[in-house]
Image: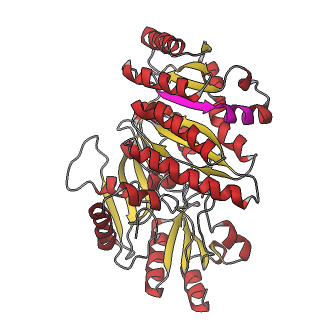
Amino acid sequence: MSTDLGTDLRSILPADRVLTDSASLAAYSHDDAEWAEFSAPLAVVQAKTTAEVADVVRLAGAAGVRIVPRGAGTGLSGGANAVANCLVLSLELMTDIIEINPDERFVRTQAGVINDQLRQAVAQQGLWYPPDPASYKISTIGGNISTNAGGLCCVKYGVTRDFVLGLTAVLADGSVVEVGRRTAKGVAGYDLTALLVGSEGTLAIITEATLKLLPLAGRENRAVVGYFNDLAAAGEAVAAVSKAGIIPSALELVDRQCLQAVDDWQQLGLATDGNVLLLASVDEPGSRGAQLAELLHSIFIGAGATKAERSVSAAHAEELFLARRLAYPALERLGPVLTEDVCVPRTAVPEMLRRIEATAREHRTVIANIAHAGDGNLHPLIIVPEGDDAAKGRAKEAFDQIVADALALGGTTTGEHGVGLLKIPGLRQEFTARVIEMHRSIKDALDPRGILNPGKAFPS
């Protein structure tokens, strides 16, 4: 970084929030995506206000320097990876919850607030923020919005975009805009809020958000767990739940690779009851919830479950879902994990699971499976021994094959993790040339110099 740029940055931010030491540059140069390319940034700057973000953007633009926005760095697609000649602009210190409005059921929050901290804060007011990505205890609201994150509850309640009413954002020229509304309804103008959600910091830098909330009361969580001999049988159970017209509050799949990893780590004894675990929950109160839980139990048995169990309390329901929450960190203990994120039609889940198993055999690769099975969002996890370059090459081939199979079944390249860098090749298959051109036109209109998170989210 030039001396002039460093001096200019320290004129608008305290010196301790302009990081240039090698350890900081290394720590902030990439997210949690395995094998996505990255470069060392010129510096890491930590903003605390929208005004500071705007000042940094204007300074960087004038200096011809690019900007990579970053939340907690928990992404799995390389969306926060630094590029050449860039500043990493961290929003992790923007942690104010500005307003909780119980009457209108919304919350205004800065982008750096952790998802779980927001959920706990609004719960104290009897309110609930449903989007709950697996990283909810460590990921930021800004990062969730930038990737349109989903989670376990999204099968019934929707993804992040469904809860974003309005945004404060800094554009590429340093101007600050407010888009969206605080009202329950509103159709004035183009839906610029929805455009920015999921744009991965390529169109604007989101600094604050107004989020819709739901009442916390009136929900009674009941869980049903089914154990199956193989993925195909569990997939048929998923399809049967959909055909029955049931919309569970969660429907998750965990395969034997994951169960064994969790058992080896936490000694829960899960892998002794079956090769695949299917976890469903319903949250309707009273007799209706009990009836749905009973129906799910019957569907699981009818689809070939070797064992099925119903929760006896809300706490028990949480315990039954523990394996799903622990699966990813348990697998990370085994070696580098290349995480997939494809989504297929619900009726195609059985066939997609069969194809994933075939891909693992063909490429001699260990693939564990966790999935938001209720909405067809599958997360095959490709595990590679540390330092095994041949296995790494086979894993990349398997990764590409899984994307191709998902598209062939009418699916999409990414369900919730975002495109980042890893999914650019898949997007070239999924989008026509004209659709890619539309993306470029929007990018050029809002960021004509191409300084905001360049090379991410769509093919350049």
Q: Residue at 50% across / 19% down in the picture? A: 220
Residue lying farthest to the left in this orientation = 188
Q: Is residue 194 left or right of residue 59?
A: left
Q: Quadrant of residue 409?
A: top left
Out of 384 and 199, give the one closest to the viewer: 384
Q: Is residue 279 left or right of residue 171?
A: right
Out of 262 and 424, give the one closest to the viewer: 424
Q: Position of residue 135 (x, y in %)?
A: 59, 45
Q: Is residue 62 above or below residue 317?
A: below
Out of 301 and 442, give the one closest to the viewer: 301
Residue lying farthest to the front in this orientation = 362
Q: Residue at 53% across / 44% down in the picture? A: 118
Q: Is residue 417 above or below residue 229?
A: below
Region in magenta: 249-262
Q: Is residue 337 left or right of residue 406?
A: right
Q: Residue at 63% across / 36% down in the picture? A: 325
Q: Quadrant of residue 256?
A: top right
Q: Quadrant of residue 388?
A: bottom right
Quarter the N terminus occupies:
bottom right
Please indicate, yes or no, whether residue 307 appears anywhere in the rendered image.
yes
Q: How is the image coloured?
A: secondary structure
Q: Position of residue 113 (x, y in %)?
A: 55, 52
Q: Position of residue 421 (x, y in %)?
A: 51, 63
Q: Residue at 42% across / 11% down in the picture? A: 288
Out of 103 and 199, give the one closest to the viewer: 199
Q: Is residue 203 above or below residue 303?
A: below
**Is 73 a magenta residue?**
no
**Is 261 a magenta residue?**
yes
Q: Position of residue 47 (x, y in %)?
A: 55, 68
Q: Is residue 190 above or below residue 88?
A: above
